[in-house]
Image (cartoon, rainbow, N blue to C red):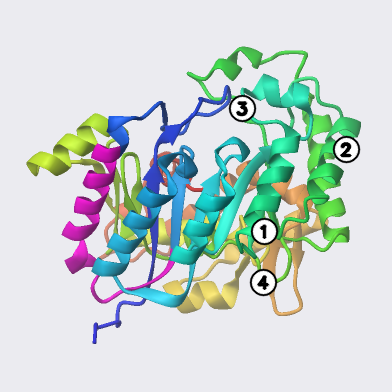
Amino acid sequence: MPNTGRGSLGVYIHIPFCHGKCAYCDFYSVTGGGAKMDRYFDALARHIAEYEPQLDGYIVDTVYFGGGTPTVFGAARLVGILNTLKKHGHIALDAEIALEANPESVDVNELRTLRRAGFNRISIGVQSSSEAQLRTLGRLHSFAMAKSAFADARAAGFRNVSADVMYGLPNQTGESFAEDLVKILSLAPDHISCYGLKLEQDTPFYVYRDSPFLPDDDTQADMYLYAVDTLERYGYHQYEISNFARRGFESRHNLKYWLGGEYLGFGASAHSYMGGARFSIHADIEKYCSGMESGGGIIDATDAVTNYELLSEYLMLRLRTTRGVSEEEYRGIYNVGMTRVLELLTSYEERGWTARTADGRWRFTPEGFLLSNTLIGELLDAQQRERAETVRPWQSPNLADESQTTLFTAERRTVAGFI
């Protein structure tokens, strides 16, 4: 029997292939594939096999195939990689095994193959019900294709189906977003991820920065608050800034990131947090494949995670969720106080940005989530000041002086590929 003393582990597998690149996307992906897919499959399988010693002792309770568009890789390859992981790791019988898909890449027979192999959750990138908006985004599907994809997923036996929807799009109004939301609700998903458009450099959509065609900040805020209220009324409770689910259908894999669990990534551009360190793989298929073939290096960066970073991440990540934080939990894990943080949380409560639950936990309200980047920055500064005031003479001064800028940069690099 394996030694399971080290606890649970999430596994992320990056599939970087797409039929086409969306105009707003800055995740690592390539169009086309052909022979590259077979070579990439072999590299992934070799990578997982080489990590068998590290996997031993963990129970893998979540597996997430992200991208790119994993279904472009083909059911046979996806099942082959999952079987490789089963061979070299210990996957829990009730593990959440999820993959992302786009409507144009869904085939009911392939979905049946995936379901029989153990995949039990699928996230379908709908984004909008408007044909004009879909074309603007560079999507290759219509809303009719999205409806067909949902029907195929249900017919294949998936009982956990998620939909992605976006707001803050060019020329989008509050009324058109409300229509989008109603049409996506008509698909009866079990989970909805609702994201605001972000304009990333080096994407075609970056030309829209400062554009009058984008909804202004107040309109986007109204869209977000409308989504929170509407989804709650339809039975989707908010459990994270951008994620809503029927009871029992929260993404267990993504919760692992937000609650500080360990995860191991395979594939080009994948990130990991395991054994007290974060490490990332080159965002380059050629470097990844050649490295696995020759025994060369595939790691792009490695950072040891300090105790102070863990302390800060407790606030930064858990306040993304509606579970939030508590003084008792904070003291129990880290054996330090949070007086200054509590003072700020209390002042935010007076402004309607935070709420205190009956069991003493603190969480952001929907209005607070809208300001969360700024508020979390203030909370981290307060935390840093308190640590500086209480650090002992024999402790390393670096414990209280580590750069918050470095922490934010590392966290964006780590989390962005998965959420």
The secondary structure type at the circle numbered 1 is helix
User: Is residue 50 on the magenta stretch?
Assistant: yes
Residues under labels 2 and 4: Cα distance? 27 Å
Q: Which residue is mark 4?
A: 248
In-front residue for pair 60/240: 60
x, y percent for residue 16:
40, 37
In which image quadrant can residue 311 be found?
bottom left
Q: Which residue is mark 1?
A: 154
Q: Which residue is mark 2?
A: 179
* Mark seen at residue 335: none
Amino acid on which disc 4 is placed:
Gly
What span is colored magenta in the figure? 38-62
Residue found at x 56% / y 45%: 107
Q: Are marks 3 and 4 in contact (CB under 8 Å)?
A: no
Q: Which residue is mark 3?
A: 140
Which corner quadrant holds the N terminus?
bottom left
x, y percent for residue 358:
76, 78
User: Which of the two marks, 1 or 4, is nearer to us in this view?
Assistant: 1
Mark positioned earlier in the residue sequence (3 or 4): 3
